[in-house]
Amino acid sequence: MELKELIAYLKYQANLNNVELARNLGVNRATLSRWESGEIKSLNSEAKQRINQYFKIDVDQYLTHNLVKPLLGTVKAGYDLSAVENIERYLEVSASDAIKGDYFLRVSGDSMINAQIYPGSLIYVKAVNDVASGSIAVVLINGEEATVKKVIKKDNILILEAANPEVANRYYSIKEVAEIPIQIIGQVLYSKIEF
């Protein structure tokens, strides 16, 4: 995690604007701006100590282990949802999960309910461009439509398989995969329901 991402996360978590955060940390707004823009990439020990005390965290642990991951918006467990990437907020993860994945997406639709991925669930995703046959993946269709499906590779066919018998599977030839294109953009590591 970069310093600018940590600052954005801490501002979001504490619901503070730049003036309030700068005042609470005892720095001027120009310094805070340089942290946020990425112009300053590391903190001196005094600044680390102030952030650690104010937020009751270990800055080095967050920066080293990337313990915060973005929730990038919504993906359809179904079809026909435009792919839009907006950071809704940040979620904390364990150190072991931090090294495995990259971001969260909120699921819309019910095509994966028999895989325990329900409407409103959050899925934790590792950014990849290929997965093993049988893996559940985030797939981008024609650069615009994002969906979550089990990816099956057979002979010269790619199948996007739903985990709901009421939702049709989609079949693509190798030619269609290249021309449409069909792109795997992430592997689903797990899903969770927020309460």
Image: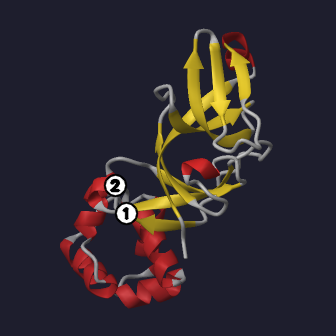
Residue matched to label 1: 93
Residue matched to label 2: 97
Q: How crowded is mark 1: few (under 14 residues within 10 Å), some or many (20 or more)?
A: some
Q: Which residue is drawn at 58% across and 9% down?
A: 155
Q: Residue at x 58, y 30 (%)?
A: 151
Identify residue type, mark 2: Asp
Q: Distance between the residues labelled 1 and 2?
A: 6 Å
Image: 41 above or below 92: above
**Can residue 4 be seen in the rendering of this structure?**
no
The reply, left or right, for residue 31 in relation to residue 186 is: left
The reply, left or right, for residue 15 in relation to residue 51 is: right
Quadrant holding the N terminus: bottom left
Q: Residue 165, which numbered label?
A: none
What SS does tag 2 mark?
helix
Q: Residues within 10 Å of mark 2 (few under 14, many from 20)?
A: some
Q: Position of residue 142 (x, y in %)?
A: 75, 30
Q: Where is residue 49 in the image (x, y as percent from the top left)?
A: 22, 80
- The one nearer the camera, 106 or 2, is 106
Q: Residue at x 65, y 33 (%)?
A: 161
Q: Position of residue 106 (x, y in %)?
A: 61, 58
The answer to whether the residue labelled 1 contacts the one labelled 2, judged by CB atoms less than 8 Å apart, is yes
Q: In which quarter of the image is residue 175?
A: top right
Identify residue type, mark 1: Val
Q: In which quarter of the image is residue 51?
A: bottom left
What SS does tag 1 mark?
loop
Q: Residue at x 23, y 70 (%)?
A: 44
- The one nearer the camera, 65 or 38, is 65
The reply, left or right, for residue 111 in relation to residue 31 is: right
Image: 29 above or below 114: below
